Image (cartoon, grey):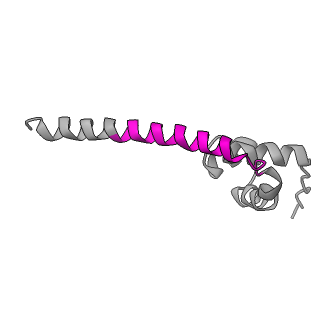
Amino acid sequence: MEKRQRRFFSREFKVEAVRLITEGQRPVGEVARELAIKPERLREWRRQLAPALAPAPRSEAEELARLRRELATLRQEKEFLGKAAAYFASRPR
């Protein structure tokens, strides 16, 4: 039986792989297939590197501004979904 040679990955490769799943909001399996690695390995890298990749703490003013923008977006989405639900509820079948 032939033994497979062990693959080594640089820290930069691991960091970029983890960023693809954290910042890009892509599934681990999809990114793992793209990079030709096992999903378990990618999850392990995420656990190891997550503390190092965490964004720096923001000032309270920046955080408040970000939360206000997010709230405005969520309110718009809620309003749109309410209108869509009313539209589909009123349509005859």
Q: Position of residue 83 (x, y in %)?
A: 25, 36
Residue 35 is drawn in which quadrant?
top right
**Left or right side of 1 for 39:** left
- Residue extending furthest front? 61
- What is the quadrant of the N terminus in the image? bottom right
Q: In the drawing, does residue 84 fall left or right of residue 24?
A: left
Type of secondary structure dominating the magenta stretch = helix
Q: Quadrant of the C terminus?
A: top left
Q: Is residue 76 left or right of residue 9?
A: left
Residue 47 percent coordinates (x, y): 76, 62
Q: Residue at x 53, y 37 (%)?
A: 69
Is residue 44 located in the magenta-colored stretch of the structure?
A: no
Decide whether residue 62 is among the magenta residues: yes
Is residue 18 or residue 28 the one in the foreground?
Answer: 18
What's drawn in magenta, residue-wise? 54-78
Residue at 60 percent of width and 39 percent of height = 65
Position of residue 81 measured from the top left corner of the image (x, y, whole percent): 31, 40
- Identify whether 37 is placed above or below 62: below
Q: Where does the image place residue 42, in percent across and percent down from the top left? A: 74, 55
